[in-house]
Amino acid sequence: MITFLVVIHVTVSIALIVIVLLQSGKGAEMGASFGTGGSQSLFGAGGGTSFMSKVTTGAAVIFMLTSLTLAYFSGKPETSSIMRSKVVPQTGLPQQGAPLQPLQGQPANTPALPQQAPRK
């Protein structure tokens, strides 16, 4: 699903760039960019501006929807794990580090503290 959305998002992004670059600037004509020299003769007498603006609007809407959908999916926490069968021990003792040693002069039945490495 996410791969499909990314493909659509990239395609619409490239299409949006091309559509915006094809649009005429202020005072320029759409047909002039293709070398025809006619005044909007590419899409008819008055349909060039409205057609290009509709295509731009449609591409922008699709771009925003895919952006929001991808942002939503990336914010969801992952629910799957490759370690499903691994049981996590529920003890309060540290799992790694130095072995626990009783302090000097401390009875053997009291909890031990972790042994610290000598400082250099």
Image (spheres, rainbow, N blue to C red):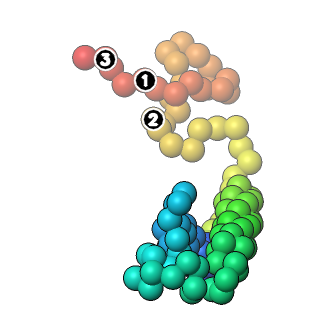
Q: Is residue 37 left or right of residue 42?
A: left
At label 3, counting other C-alpha atoms closer than 10 Å, the crowd grade (few under 14, some 14-19, many 20 or more) is few
Task: Report if the CB atoms under discs 3 and 2 are less than 8 Å apart.
Answer: no
Q: Position of residue 93 (x, y in %)?
A: 64, 38
In this image, 55 relative to 97: left or right?
right
Within 10 Å of disc 2 (Cα), the crowding (few <14, some 14-19, many 20+) is few
Residue closest to the far left = 120
Q: State which quarter of the image contains the N terminus.
A: bottom right
Give the number of marks.
3
Q: Secondary structure at mark 3?
A: loop
- For marks 1 and 2, the one nearer the N-term is 2
Name the foreground residue: 79 vs 105: 79
Q: Residues within 10 Å of mark 1 (few under 14, many from 20)?
A: few
The three-letter amino acid code for the residue at tag 2 is: Ala
Q: Which residue is mark 2?
A: 98
| Residue 76 figure quarter | bottom right
Residue 37 placement, left or right of 95? left
Q: Secondary structure beneath disc 2?
A: loop
Type of amino acid at the residue the image marks with label 3: Arg
Mark 1: which amino acid?
A: Gln
Whether the residues at callouts 1 and 2 have beta carbons within 8 Å, the answer is yes
**Marking on residue 116:** 1
Residue 107 in view (yes/no): yes
Q: Determine whether 38 is above or below 22 in the image.
A: below
